[in-house]
Image (spheres, rainbow, N blue to C red):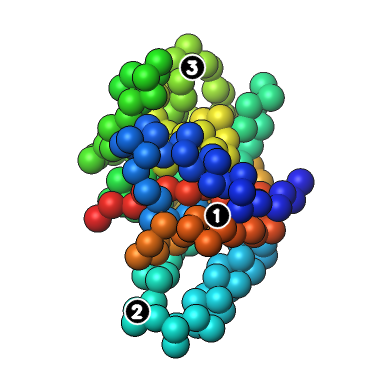
Amino acid sequence: MKKTVLGILTMLMAVIVLAGCGMFAKANGIILYGEEEEVLNAVETIKEKEKGEKKEREKEELVEEEQHNIKVLTDDNRQIMILTEQTAQSLIKKKLISEITNQEKGETKAISSLSKVAKGEALLFTKEESYELEIENMNIKYEGNLIIGDGRAYVDMFLIVNDEEWASLEGTEKVMAILKFDKDPSADGFSYEVEKAQLVRIQD
């Protein structure tokens, strides 16, 4: 179901989800999730807004943008996002994949590397260490309690697979767009017709 992401709700969520990466650290990016057309339209809307306001400031606020194809499947009423190894490495480079080091205190630490994913293997990241996910002809290994951004904003868990095998796996194809700004994008509020918009702190 399409969801309108309201600015006021987003700002409230920012206070909650960003607390894990530092005491009220400011966001400088957004991850948009959803159907390809929805996400691409949202990205174009942002670019058009930036183009219209460019004359009023010295530099452009949207400084980086990239898109990745993902898949989403449902297993036992849980939503699982499937990423290619290449997509995962891009997220790691931006310090957008973190390990939860203290669940009670909400403490996290960005990871700097990931185990190599061989053909026929998949890495599963979820808070439920005993969760058993079965995919035909796939050896699934639990690799820890990791999250994207500062919380489980879009799905319950995620799976990383070999780039060549991603296309053959079942799941509904979606798009993830990562946008980086030179200021907190929630400052002016925003609203997009996508399934989910997640404020994040992107680091280089």
For the residue marked with disc 2, what is the amino acid?
A: Lys
Vertical comparison of 36 with 55: above or below: above
Q: CA distance from mark 2 to mark 3?
A: 45 Å
User: Within 10 angstroms of label 3, few (less than 14), some, or many (20 or more) residues?
Assistant: few
Work out which quarter of the rendered image holds the C terminus and state it.
Answer: bottom left
Residue 140 picture location, percent across and down: 45, 26
Q: CA distance from mark 2 to mark 1?
A: 23 Å
Callout 3: helix, strand or loop? Answer: loop
| Viewer-side residue, 48 vs 125 | 48
Callout 1: helix, strand or loop? Answer: strand
For the residue marked with disc 1, what is the amino acid?
A: Leu
The circle on residue 32 is 1
Task: Pick out the residue farthest to the bottom.
Answer: 55
Q: What residue is disc 3 on? A: 128
Callout 2: helix, strand or loop? Answer: loop
| Viewer-side residue, 140 vs 10 | 10
For the residue marked with disc 3, what is the amino acid?
A: Glu
Q: Residue 117 appears in which quarter of the rendering?
A: top left
Q: What residue is disc 2 on? A: 59
| Viewer-side residue, 97 vs 69 | 97
User: Within 10 angstroms of label 2, few (less than 14), some, or many (20 or more) residues?
Assistant: few
Vertical comparison of 95 with 193: above or below: above
Report whether residue 30 is seen. yes
State which tag comes first along the sequence, 2 or 1.
1
The residue drawn where x is 41% and y is 39% is 18
- Between marks 2 and 3 in the image, the one whose residue lies nearer the viewer: 2
| 26 with respect to 152 (left or right) | left
- Between marks 2 and 1 in the image, the one whose residue lies nearer the viewer: 2
State which tag comes first along the sequence, 1 or 3.
1
Residue 39 picture location, percent across and down: 61, 61
